Image: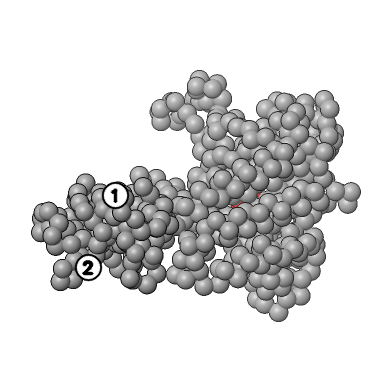
C-alpha cells in the first residue's frame, strides 16, 4: 500500500506492506526507528524494527539515508506526536543499498544550486518532492477547469515554420550537418522540411484555426525559447497553457484568465495542504498570505497608460526610467502589484509597437487590445490579447512587421472566411508552479530544467 494510505489507516492485526526509501534511522536499546518515505506524500511512515528481527545486525543496523526497503508488518497506534500509526515490522528486506560514503543526499539541508547538479536525485528531497506533487495537482486542475468551461483540448505542432510572434528566438530543427549549413545561400532549401523549421515558441496561431471551428480550445504543451536570458523566471524549455475562444473580446478574455488563476490557487489550497505548509514554513513565509489574496480578492484592472502615469509619479528610483512607449520591466510590474495595488493586476491596452502583429488594433490607432496579468512576487504570469480579426488591418500590420505573407497565407485565410472576434492568452505553467510554491528560481519548478549551458540529464 502507499504510505499516504497507510498513514490514514486504523491500527489493525492485518499484515500490510510498505515500500520506500529510508530518510533516517535512529537506534534505541531494543528497537530501531526508521523514517520511510515513498513519495506518495510529504509525511514519512515510522517503522519500528525490533532487535529480534531476523538479520537485524546485517540489515537494519546498516540502513542509511537513501536505502530502499520493503517492510511487512502490522499498523500499531503510535505514541509519538504527529502521527496516528506506525508500522511494527515483522520482516524487513533491503531492495537497494545506498552507500553513505558516496550518496550525495544527506540529512542536512542542501542548497538549491547544489541540488540542481543532482537533478536525478533531488526529487527525493522534501521540497522538490512537494513541488512535483503540487505540479501534478495543478496540471489536473488545468484540465478540469477547461473541461468544466466547455473547452476542448487540442494538440498543436511542436515543429513549426512560423516564428509565431518573434516571441523569442526559435531553436532550429535540421538534419543538415554543420558544413552544409555553413555553405550555400539557402541551406534550408535542401533540409528535411524544405525550409527553415524550428521548435514552437507558442501554439497560438494554430489554436486560433481550431477555435474558429470548435469555439473554445486550449493547448497545454512544451514550448521552447532560445532566449539567452539567465533570469530566475525564464527557461529554454517550458510548458504553456493557451486557451483560445471564438466570439470573445478582451474583457471576456481577462475575466476568464482571472477565474482560471483563482480556480487553480483554490484547488491547490484545498488539495495540497501538507505540501503548501512546507513551502510556507521553509521556502517563503509570505506565501500563505499571497495565495489567500489571489484566491480571495478581485484582480485590479488598469490600462498601460494609467500604469505609466502611476509609475512616473512614484517616489521610487527605477533602474529603467519610465515613459509612455517603454516595455514594463519586472521591477515596474512588481512595484505595481506589490506596492501600489497589493493584489493581482491586469494591465491592458499596450502600445502597438511593443506587441506582436496579431493583437487587435484599438480605435486610437496606437494601442492594441492586449492584457498582461501581474502577480505579487513574480510579475508577469499571463500574456493575452484579442486577436485582429479584420483582414485589411491584419495584412497591413504583418507587412509592417516585415513578415513573409506567403508563410502566413493560411492565417490570413482565417480572416477571409467566417472571421469572428476571438481572444486568448498564454500562461507559463512553471511561472504558475513558482507562484504557488514560492520557489525563488524557476529552475526548481520543473524536474530537469533547460537553460543556457544546461541540458544535462
Ligand atoms: P516575459 O516578458 O516574462 O519574457 P513574454 O512576454 O515573453 O514574457 P509571452 O510570450 O506573452 O511572454 O508568453 C506567455 C507566458 O509564457 C508568459 O506570461 C509567461 O508566463 C510564460 N513564459 C514566457 N517566456 C517564458 C520562459 N522563457 N520560461 C518560462 N515561462 C515563460
Ligand atoms: Mn520573453
Q: Nearer the viewer, residue 250 or 34?
A: 34
- Is residue 308 placed above or below 255 in the rendered structure? below
Residue occupying image coordinates x 50% and y 54%? 134
Residue occupying image coordinates x 55% and y 31%? 159
Residue 440 falls left or right of residue 62: right
Which x, y percent locates residue 108? 30, 68
Q: Quadrant of residue 217?
A: top right
Q: Label 1, on which residue?
A: 15
Which x, y percent locates residue 35? 29, 61
Determine crowd level at label 1: few under 14, some 14-19, many 20+ residues with C-alpha closer than 10 A: few
Residue 234 showing in the rendered view: no
Determine crowd level at label 2: few under 14, some 14-19, many 20+ residues with C-alpha closer than 10 A: few
Q: Quadrant of residue 164?
A: top right
Q: Label 2, on which residue?
A: 26
Residue occupying image coordinates x 57% and y 37%? 200
- Is residue 48 placed above or below 310 in the rendered structure? above
Q: Quadrant of residue 329?
A: bottom right
Q: Is mark 1 within 8 Å of ligand 1?
A: no
| SS state under label 2 | strand
Which circle's residue, 1 or 2, is located before the other in the chain? 1
Between circles 1 and 2, the one closer to the viewer is: 1
Amino acid at each position: 500500500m502507499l504510505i499516504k494510505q497507510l498513514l490514514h489507516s486504523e491500527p489493525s492485526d492485518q499484515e500490510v506492506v510498505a515500500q520506500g526509501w529510508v530518510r533516517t534511522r535512529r537506534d534505541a536499546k531494543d528497537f530501531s526507528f526508521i523514517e520511510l518515505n515513498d513519495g506518495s506524500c510529504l509525511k514519512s511512515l515510522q517503522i519500528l524494527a525490533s532487535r529480534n528481527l531476523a538479520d537485524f545486525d546485517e540489515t537494519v543496523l546498516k540502513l542509511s539515508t537513501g536505502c530502499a526497503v520493503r517492510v511487512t508488518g502490522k499498523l500499531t497506534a503510535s505514541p509519538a506526536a504527529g502521527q496516528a500509526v506506525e508500522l511494527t515490522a515483522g520482516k524487513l528486506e533491503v531492495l537497494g543499498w545506498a552507500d553513505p560514503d558516496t550518496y550525495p543526499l544527506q540529512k542536512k539541508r542542501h542548497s538549491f544550486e547544489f541540488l540542481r547538479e543532482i537533478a536525478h536525485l533531488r526529487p527525493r528531497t522534501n521540497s522538490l518532492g512537494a513541488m512535483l506533487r503540487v505540479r501534478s495537482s495543478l496540471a489536473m486542475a488545468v484540465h478540469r477547469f477547461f473541461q468544466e468551461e466547455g473547452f476542448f483540448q487540442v494538440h498543436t505542432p511542436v515543429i513549426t515554420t512560423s516564428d509565431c510572434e518573434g516571441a523569442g528566438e526559435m531553436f532550429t530543427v535540421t538534419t543538415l550537418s554543420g558544413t552544409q549549413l555553413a555553405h550555400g545561400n539557402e541551406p534550408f532549401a535542401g533540409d528535411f522540411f524544405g525550409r527553415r523549421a524550428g521548435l514552437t515558441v507558442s501554439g497560438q496561431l494554430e489554436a486560433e484555426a481550431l477555435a474558429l471551428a470548435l469555439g473554445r480550445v486550449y493547448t497545454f504543451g512544451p514550448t521552447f525559447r532560445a532566449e539567452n536570458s539567465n533570469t530566475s523566471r525564464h527557461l529554454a524549455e517550458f510548458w504553456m497553457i493557451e486557451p483560445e475562444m471564438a466570439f470573445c473580446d478582451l474583457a471576456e478574455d481577462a475575466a476568464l484568465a482571472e477565474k482560471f488563476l483563482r480556480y487553480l490557487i483554490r484547488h491547490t489550497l484545498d488539495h495540497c495542504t501538507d505540501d503548501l505548509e512546507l513551502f510556507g514554513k521553509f521556502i517563503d513565509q509570505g506565501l500563505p498570505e499571497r495565495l489567500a489574496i489571489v484566491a480571495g480578492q478581485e484582480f485590479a484592472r488598469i490600462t498601460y497608460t494609467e500604469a505609466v502615469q502611476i509609475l512616473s509619479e512614484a517616489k521610487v528610483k527605477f533602474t529603467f526610467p519610465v515613459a509612455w512607449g517603454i516595455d514594463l520591466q519586472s521591477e515596474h510590474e512588481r512595484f505595481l502589484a506589490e506596492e501600489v495595488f497589493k493584489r493581482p493586476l491586469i494591465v491592458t491596452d499596450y502600445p502597438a509597437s511593443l506587441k506582436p502583429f496579431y493583437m487587435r488594433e484599438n480605435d486610437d490607432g496606437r494601442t492594441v487590445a492586449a492584457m498582461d496579468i501581474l502577480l505579487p512576487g513574480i510579475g508577469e504570469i499571463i500574456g493575452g490579447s484579442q486577436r485582429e480579426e479584420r483582414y485589411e488591418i491584419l495584412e497591413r500590420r504583418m507587412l509592417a512587421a516585415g513578415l513573409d505573407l506567403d508563410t502566413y497565407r493560411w492565417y490570413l485565410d482565417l480572416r477571409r472566411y467566417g472571421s469572428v472576434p476571438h481572444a486568448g492568452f498564454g500562461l507559463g505553467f512553471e511561472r504558475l508552479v513558482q507562484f504557488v510554491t514560492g520557489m525563488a528560481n524557476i529552475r526548481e519548478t520543473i524536474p530537469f530544467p533547460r537553460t543556457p549551458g544546461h541540458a544535462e540529464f
